[in-house]
Image (cartoon, helix red, strand yellow):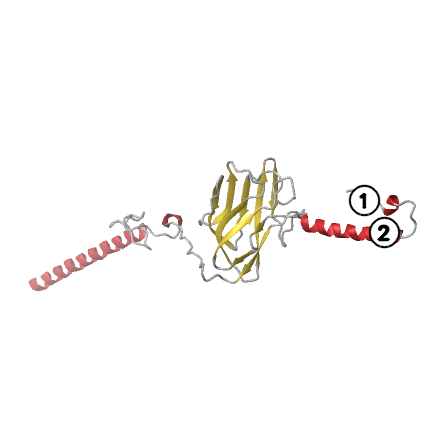
Amino acid sequence: MTTVLPHTLYPDQTTGGQALSTRTLRRALLLGCVLLLVAPPAWAHPSVQGGEAPVDSLATVTLAMAHGCGSEQSGGGDPTIEVALEVPDQVRVVDAEERDGWDVALEQDAGGRITVVTWVARDAQEAAPAVEFRAVFSGAPGDEVYLKVFQGCDGFAYRWIGTPDEPAADPAVRVRLTEADPDNPPPAEAEPEPEDRPDAAPGRDEAPDVAPPSAAAPVDGQDEGTVDGRDRRTGFLALAVGIAILGGGIWIGRRLRG
């Protein structure tokens, strides 16, 4: 927009020029205020609908992209073809909602906890899609949880990962925790399968992988030398008893003959 100064419009008027300039300045300020109200912010970034989530409750979270790639205008830019959510420790994702034209993939750790949720577009052409997932947030009312989000397009990507502890150019999605929702209690956490637990005992139908001790084998705490020594001592004792009995019999026989 080109602004024409008052003295250019009225070159021959020298009186009233100050009033005319003030009037123009007021109009410019009014026009600027209107543009600020109508124009979308250039710093728009992904957000959670409502910006809040209840603690220790099953919450349905809507994660909305503000714009596509290559543009900071709300709703503008190239189509988004991938959205990935890195799940923080304070959040337990229960499941992710499927959308028409999108595939959903879940990554889990060894304990079965969902750590990454990824939505990939098949044929959708949306610059600023909104995806949903259900989760349980841990913490206290008033705490803030930050969701790190990856937004990818064809040849361009945003990494919304900035937090107060780890600042970055593009901020992560901030969620403020509120009081628990008694109407939506959290579901029970799924326990790992028995074969996945290192302390799991064998089933009733499974034989223990330890053979019973042999009758000839030494008992615990004894080695083979101990067993052999005991056998030798027992033989010597039996021999001594036999000699004693034999000697006693000879002595008795002599006394009887004498």
Percent coordinates x, y for residue 65 in the rendering: 58, 46
Q: Give the side of residue 42 with respect to residue 214, left or right.
A: right
User: Mark 2 = which residue?
Assistant: 20
Q: Amino acid at mark 1?
A: Thr
Which residue matches tag 1? 3
Instruction: Report which quarter residue 235 is drawn in.
Output: bottom left
- Residue closer to the observer: 75 or 82: 75
Image position, residue 250 (x, y; %): 12, 59
| Displayed quadrant of residue 256 | bottom left
Q: Give coordinates of residue 123: x percent, y percent.
A: 51, 36
Q: Secondary structure at mark 2?
A: helix
The amino acid beneath tag 2 is Leu
Specify few, some or many for label 2: CA neighbours under 10 Å numbering under 14, 14-19, or 20 or more: some
What separation in Å lies between label 1 and label 2 (alpha carbons)?
14 Å
Q: Is residue 194 visible?
A: yes
Identify the image quadrant of the C terminus.
Answer: bottom left
What quarter of the picture does the N terminus occupy?
A: top right
Query: Which of label 1 and label 2 is nearer to you?
Result: 2
Mark carried by residue 129: none
In this view of the protein, which residue sits in the foreground, 64 or 89? 64
List the single residue furthest toward the left: 257
